[in-house]
Amino acid sequence: MDSWETLAPFLVYGLFVALGFSRYYRAMSQLRIKEHEVDRLREEAERQKEAIKREALVAAGEEIQRMRAEAEREVRERRSELQRTERRLGQREETLDRRQQTLERRERQNTLREQEATRLREQASALVGKQRQELERVAALPTEEARQIILSRVEDECRLDASRLVQQIEAEAQEEAQRRARHIVTLAIQKCAVDQTAESTVSVVPLPSDDMKGRIIGREGRNIRAFETLTGVDLIIDDTPEAVVVSAFDVVRREIARLALESLVIDGRIHPARIEETVQKARAQVEQEIKTAGERAVLDVGLSGVNPELVKTLGRLRFRTSYGQNVLRHSVEVAHLAAAMASELGVDPQLVRRAGLFHDLGKAVDFEVDGPHALISADIARRHGESPEVVQAIAAHHGDVEQDTLASVLIQAADAISASRPGARRESLETYVKRLETLEKLGDSFEGVEKTYAIQAGREIRVMVKPDRITDDGSAKLARDIAKRIESELEYPGQIKVIVIRETRMVDFAR
């Protein structure tokens, strides 16, 4: 009991000490927690401050960009306005320069006119003086002598006026005739729009491979011999890759051979019996095409009552060309052109259509019959029941017989138009250049000509003359002389226009 009492104060003291240490540690713990909280708040404040600073920087940057864009836009607008102002000023300066040049030119013209007027007044005064002197002289002459002098002068003046009047009437008549002719020809051409095709003298047949050439030749050449014998063409097998050339003057035979060879190549069975069968089929096909082409041409022209044999001969022209121009298309075109001109001139259009369509029939058989194709065509038309007027127009379209009717003249004109218009025929470069050189040399051969130029594909020549040697009246005579010489020495389709140019130039320099 005594010991407990002795220890009790110590225990109480120890308890208080423990309690104090416990509160101290708890207070220290809370203090550390608050210090951590303060640090956290300080860091968060720092972060917020940084974020606010960044936002402020971004906003400031955007504002700067906006202000810069507005400034650049304003600068561009001002620059554009300045450029527009500069352009307007430049245009005004050019306008003022042009006006100044116009005023200067007008001033020079007025000065020249004043000088010319002064010169004319002086000439008039001189003439009046001369007339006064002449009158004074005539007044001293006898009556009869004065009368003869006056009549002589009046006669000379009347002759000069009559010559000018005749020249004016001739020019007006020629102009009216040319205008009427151009109208008729142009109207005829407008009524006829036919496509032109060009056929070559050889046909090329493509092959699937070069091995097919050996099969076409056959063992010891029996296949190619059989083919050439049956078709009457030459089969050219050379080093050209994957192609065979069919050559023949007779275009119908060449077409039959081309169709037969293409059929044999597609079929693949090539031997003499098969070749004979294929050639017969190709010949029948071509005959049908000839008949169809002739009937289509007759239908296009609008004819009726045509002999079937005549239609067949006409269809053969589908495979005939002349200077690169398809003869059947050319015949249809001539028929349309001639009929259009005949309608304008009051001639029977149907008669002219028949003559125009059949005018080149001889070209379908000119490999078999000798003679000019115009006479051959007329003979064929006569044998198949065409009227004498049609036969005469066909025979006369190349001058082989005399042109007795207007229809024959129209056929000749339509034939020349169809053959000579640009693009209708192909012409070799050498022939073309030679024709132009011949025209220029012919023009240069005349006295007083400085240089001749052939233009418009040789359908027009322009002759530059020396003004000190050729007068204005001499220019007209020179143009006629050159035209007459071209007509007598050269052969050409259509017509050639001759233009004589006389020019005087005065050059000076303002220093």
Image (cartoon, grey):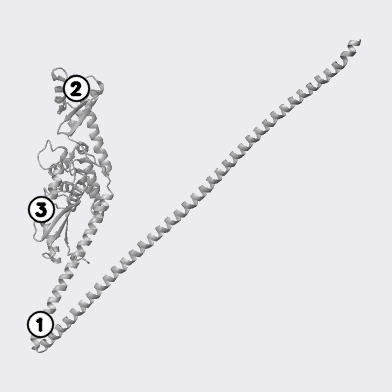
Mark 2 residue element: helix
**For marks 1 and 3 on the same chain, the one whose residue lies earlier in the sequence:** 1
Label at residue 213: 2
Q: In the rendered view, does 480 fall on the left or right side of 86?
A: left
Kindly identify the amino acid type of the residue bearing the numbered disc 1.
Ile
**For marks 2 and 3 on the same chain, the one whose residue lies earlier in the sequence:** 2
Asked if one can make out residue 328 in the rendered structure from this viewpoint, the answer is yes
Locate residue 329: give its quadrant: top left
In the rendered view, would you say 375 is above or below 32? below
Q: CA distance from mark 1 to mark 2?
A: 99 Å
Question: Which is in the foreground here, disc 1 or disc 2?
Answer: 2
Question: Which is in the foreground here, disc 2 or disc 3?
Answer: 3
| Viewer-nearest residue: 77 or 488 | 77
| Residue 248 screen position, x and y as percent | 15, 32
**For marks 1 and 2 on the same chain, the one whose residue lies earlier in the sequence:** 1
Kindly identify the amino acid type of the residue bearing the numbered disc 3.
Lys
Q: Residues within 10 Å of mark 3 (few under 14, many from 20)?
A: some
Query: Quadrant location of the C terminus?
Result: bottom left
| Residue 77 screen position, x and y as percent | 47, 53
Q: Name the residue at 26% across, 73% down.
A: 111
Q: Which residue is mark 3?
A: 441
Mark 3 residue element: helix
Q: Name the residue at 45% across, 56% down.
A: 81
Q: Which residue is mark 1?
A: 149
Locate residue 508: give its quadrant: bottom left
Q: CA distance from mark 2 to mark 3?
A: 53 Å
